[in-house]
Image (cartoon, rainbow, N blue to C red):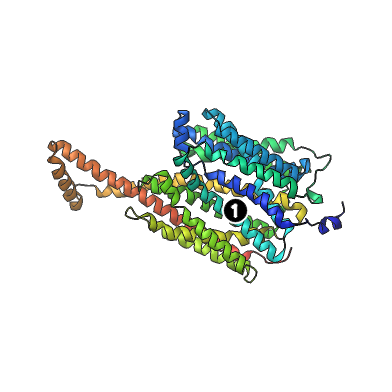
Amino acid sequence: MSTLSQENWKPKNPWLLVIPTMLAAFMFALDETIANIALPHMAGSFSVSHQESIWVLTSYLIASCLTIPMIDWLGRLMGRKALFISCVTLFTAASFMCGISTSIGMMVISRFLQGLGGGVLIPIAQAIMMENFEGDELNRAGSIFGMVVIIAPILGPVLGGWITENWSWHWIYFINIPIGIIIVALSYKLIEDPPYAQKQSNVKTDYWGLLFLIMFAVAFEIMMDKGNDQDWFNSSFIVKLTVIWVIGLIGFIISQVRQKDSLIKFDVLKDFNYFMGTVVLTVMNAILLASMAMLPQFMQNMMGYDSFTSGLTMMPRGVGCLIGVILCGKISSKVDPRVLSFIGIFILCLGSWDLGFINLEISSMNVVVPNILYGLGMTLGMIPVITLSCKTIPPERMSNASGLQNFIKTIGGAVGTSLVATFISRFSQMHQHMMVDWLRDTNTVYLERLQAYAGQFAQLTDFSSAAYMAQTMIYNELSRQAHLWAYVDSFRIFAIAGLIILLLIPLLRVKKA
């Protein structure tokens, strides 16, 4: 197939391709977070601890990390349409296996298979969108893609909480089955492979690349997931994992640079827009997933909300996303995309900074406005960058570019989610260490409060027990305040991270593909 014929190739109706690809991307992104709320119920069903149930999430992330960077190689080996349909079929079958799982081992294996099938769905959807649209249509398609990858993880905890409370956790997986069947049927009818995405002969397998990729991805995900629980580098287990993933990463990069038929073509990072855009998107994805993990945790642990109600606190983000999608569709063709992205990331910073003033007296309504700002800022900031970062990539290299970009974004999301647990743990220790200095006999306010509490408890028990109960009550309140400040500091760090990537937006170049 000549280069000219590749350039002249166009699908019959590109908008029809959006239906199955975006449905698949939505299904995969939804399952990244839908199981979070149901973990306690799964742990009870399988008679395992909460820490063991975390493998339900970890196995899914590990598997998706393995397949995302292999999308270009698998596409050449099978053809992109065949790859897409096969992965949707595997994802759907694995969802059924998750729903009927009777042990934690069966569930982890099923989730691993689900991640293997789902890992390529978002990169393929992004590649098809970027290949088949131009100009204003590309902006509209980018808005749809951005809405899918942002709204789906937000809806996950809400939908998962509702299904778990009203039916059972099994149904958070069973709902994928009819959707998967519809996607497969539509894909057979609507998806067309361009000449450069069809099955190729004599495709060689990079076995060294596969080996190093497995070493790197598996060790890194487990390290980030278990690091805080194991006290990071004070644990020999974490140190060993670090050595494995560092060796795997170095070996993977060397093998991909030296091998002609490699899994990933790293030379795409030479494209300035692609490199800068990937950095911005990775940090934004880390902020998105980290804040989504932290806010429901705050509402449950500090405010006493149940799982479903805490999940509902994320719904205003969906409202902000919808507003952002509408705005992008209306003004993206009239405004410099860098300006739009700059405004969006600035709004995201405002939302993070606003959440940095939470306290223990707030109601659920006090997080509505910051969450709307989060959703609006994420959409306005992310959609133009997705478009700009891949706009200068040739169509025949789009699968490789989208796969690598989503792989890096996934790593960023894993880092962000893991940092949440570390921030809360370490910052609360730091603030508790600073606050405990006020609980001294030389502090008259502390002594007055201690005597007042002890006097109240003395009416119910002896004096020594009353004094102990008063000290315990004050210390518990100190611990709560220390944890509160840990959440405050974390949200403010997210705002600062947003300001840093804000400085990168003017560096992006606006030019035609």
Residue drawn at (24%, 41%) of the image? 472
52 or 187: nearer the eye? 187
Which picture quadrant has residue 469?
top left
Which picture quadrant has residue 202?
top right
Kindly identify which residue carries mark 1: 148
Crowd rating for badge 1 (residues with CA inside 10 Å; few <14, some 14–19, many 20+) = many
307 or 53: nearer the eye? 307
401 or 305: nearer the eye? 305
**Residue 222 visible to an observer of this rendering:** no
The amino acid type, in three-letter code, at marker 1 is Val
Question: Relative to 461, is 180 on the left or the right?
Answer: right
Tell me where residue 55 appears, x and y as whole percent. 52, 35
Tell me where residue 107 appears, x and y as whole percent. 55, 32
- Relative height, residue 390 to residue 205 (above, below): below
**Residue 17 visible to an observer of this rendering:** yes
**Under tag 1, what secondary structure?**
helix
Tell me where residue 205 appears, x and y as whole percent. 76, 37
